[in-house]
Amino acid sequence: MNGHLSNIAIADICDALLALPAPALVGIDGRSGAGKTTLANALAARLEAAGRRVSTVEVEAYIGGWGSLVDDIGKLARMAGELSQRGSTQATPWDWAKEHWAEPVRIPRAGQADVVILVGCGSTSASVRPYLDLTVWLEADAELRLKRVRARDPYDWSEHWPGWAAQEEALLAEFPSNEKASFTLLSEA
């Protein structure tokens, strides 16, 4: 895997998901740069190796820009509800480069998933949580998170960092996802 997440913790989360009936929904939450996508990719690989069909949904793909995390999290809740009930949904992604909504897409692209991984800031927030079978919170210190984001993204979004962080805090003030997770992982360098 990689150096900052425990393979034991990943195996435990994977085992918990394998024990759930399909479609199982898991939310992987944490502040920007905590390692959510890294964990989602590792889980998806393990679950697929165990014969499960996995669909990963990046929260930020369905949030309408830098100032819309809190306002648009309800869209994710609707998506999670439909995925939980029907095993599929349709959603309209945000085109970050062009700064407008794109054409609707089907999730998963075809068929139904055995496991749906909702990954991103707010994925275990109050409105989404009722549809989740399992929740994961990743914690990492602010300096490490900022370093990762700067290394990860090909553009500089430092002007948006304070506003995005304030939205993360607003979601946590509404519901303390970081204190109520099924699994909490410390993501380190």
Image (tube, rainbow, N blue to C red):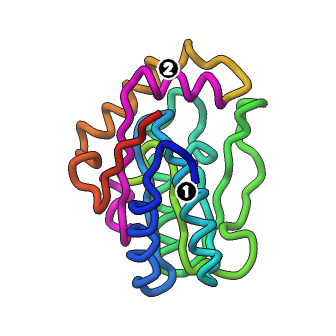
Which residues are the magenta region? 126-152
Q: Quadrant of residue 171?
A: top left
- Residue holding disc 1: 40
Q: Can you identify the residue that label 2 sits on?
A: 161
Residue 61 or 50: which is nearer the viewer? 50
At x 42% / y 76%, what residue is drawn?
A: 15
User: Of the residues shown, which amino acid type is indicated by label 2?
Assistant: Trp
| Mark 1, secondary structure of its residue | helix
Left or right, residue 176 beside residue 25:
left
**Residue 45 versus residue 180 in the image, above or below:** below
User: What residue type is disc 1 on?
Assistant: Ala
Residue 115 forms part of the magenta stretch: no
Measuring from the top left, give residue 174's x and y in whole percent: 24, 42
Q: Is residue 184 above or below residue 32?
A: below
Using residue 181 as the reference point, say whether residue 76 is left or right of it.
Answer: right
Label ID, residue 69: none
Query: Which of 170/56 is in front?
Result: 56
Quadrant of the image containing the N terminus: bottom right
- Measured from the top left, where is residue 75 in percent x and y? 51, 53
